[in-house]
Image (spheres, rainbow, N blue to C red):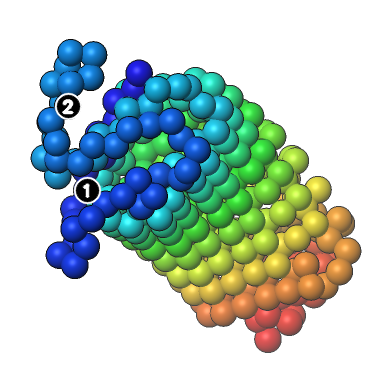
């Protein structure tokens, strides 16, 4: 039986927290709010905390905390996730969450991390160094609208099996740099909007990116208004069949000049002529 403590602060106008407010239907759990209960002869009392007691192990914890907009911190360091394969939207729209402890999180069997931290607008840093992503195929919108995120370490990410990275960092407007030098993108087909509205991004290393299988790069760097140069000389756009799949790729990249973009692909050149004219 796993016990998870998640701190919560109530709004003055909303004194009632229901099970539906906190967790999707279908989870076998009990929730105690500001009460004393005995579980396996252990006295549990956490003022202003929610206590989750999970009775079974699940393969999917999809949308587990989705929409818990009052949560400010959560510690899942002791939560057993060995069998979990789906973490899609797990913390989506936890807009007040400022700290999250995922140390010890087992992600060895996870295949879907799409929208996992989407709209966690108050998170300023995220330590995912313990994550094993070797089986993950979906990272679409993983950090979408993490607008306070300044630091993110993805150096241990294994992306060998990922096929979808669309909108992955979209609207991470405070990130100034992202180190993706370890990313393997051999199997990625969708990079649409991947860095859209990363307006503080000044540098990005994509030298290891393999885009041979990518079919969509639309809006990929759109509104990266602080980006001054970029090396795309290893990019291959042969599988992008229609112009709309590259549409607005560099739109509103106000500091990016044609001569500051390294490229070999003819399609990138054509898109540059449209976007940077």
Using residue 8 as the reference point, say whether residue 226 is left or right of it: right
Task: Out of 47 and 17, give the one closest to the viewer.
Answer: 17
The reply to whether dot 2 and dot 1 touch (C-beta < 8 Å) is no
* Label 1 crowd (10 A; few <14 / some 14-19 / many >=20): many
Q: Is residue 76 above or below residue 233?
A: above
What residue appears at the point 82 percent right and 67 percent down from the top-left corner?
267
Image location of residue 153, percent across then percent down: 42, 41
- Left or right? Give the position of 250 relative to 244: left
The number of numbered discs placed on residues in the rendered structure image is 2
Closest to the observer: 189 or 267?
Answer: 189
Discs 2/1, front: 2
Badge 2 element: strand
Where is residue 20 shown, x and y percent of the image? 39, 50
Closer to the chain start, of discs 2 and 1, is: 1
Could you tell me which residue is drawn at 23 percent across and 19 percent down?
39
Tag of residue 240:
none
When the figure is inspected, residue 183 is found, relative to residue 199, above or below; the finding is above
Is any atom of residue 130 visible in this view? no
Helix or strand or loop: what does disc 1 sit on?
Answer: strand
Quarter of the rendering occupied by the N terminus? top left
In the image shown, does 210 or 189 lie closer to the viewer?
189
Q: Which mark is residue 37?
A: 2
Answer above or below: position of 212 versus 77: below
In percent of width and height, residue 41 lies at 18, 13
Q: Quadrant of residue 268?
A: bottom right
- Residue labelled with disc 1: 8
**Residue shown at 19% from the left, 67% from the top:** 13
Percent of width and height locating residue 129: 42, 32
Residue 210 lies left or right of residue 81; in this view the side is: right
Residue 101 visible? The answer is: yes
Looking at the rendered image, the quarter that the C terminus falls into is: bottom right
Which residue sits at x=25%, y=44%? 73
């Amino acid at each position: 039986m796993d016990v998870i403590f998640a701190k919560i602060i109530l709004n003055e106008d909303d004194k009632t927290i229901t099970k539906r407010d906190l967790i999707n239907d279908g989870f076998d759990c009990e929730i105690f709010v500001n009460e004393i209960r005995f579980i396996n002869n252990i006295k549990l009392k956490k003022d202003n905390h929610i206590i989750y007691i999970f009775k079974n192990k699940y393969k999917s914890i999809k949308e587990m905390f989705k929409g818990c907009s009052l949560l400010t911190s959560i510690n899942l360091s002791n939560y057993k996730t060995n069998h979990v394969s789906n973490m899609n939207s797990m913390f989506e729209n936890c807009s007040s969450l400022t700290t999250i402890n995922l140390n010890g999180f087992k992600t060895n069997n996870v295949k879907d991390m799409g929208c996992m931290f989407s709209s966690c607008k108050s998170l300023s840093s995220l330590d995912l160094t313990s994550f094993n992503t070797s089986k993950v195929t979906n990272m679409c919108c993983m950090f979408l609208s993490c607008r306070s995120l300044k630091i993110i370490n993805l150096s241990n990410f294994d992306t060998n099996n990922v096929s979808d990275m669309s909108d992955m960092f979209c609207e991470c407007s405070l990130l100034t740099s992202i180190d993706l030098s370890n990313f393997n993108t051999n199997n990625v087909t969708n990079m649409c909007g991947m860095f859209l509205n990363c307006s503080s991004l000044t540098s990005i290393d994509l030298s290891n990116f393999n885009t041979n299988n990518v079919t969509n790069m639309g809006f990929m760097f759109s509104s990266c208004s602080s980006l001054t140069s970029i090396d795309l000389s290893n990019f291959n756009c042969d599988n992008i069949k229609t112009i709309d799949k590259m549409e607005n790729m560099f739109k509103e990249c106000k500091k990016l000049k044609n001569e500051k973009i390294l490229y070999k692909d003819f399609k990138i050149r054509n898109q540059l002529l449209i976007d940077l004219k």
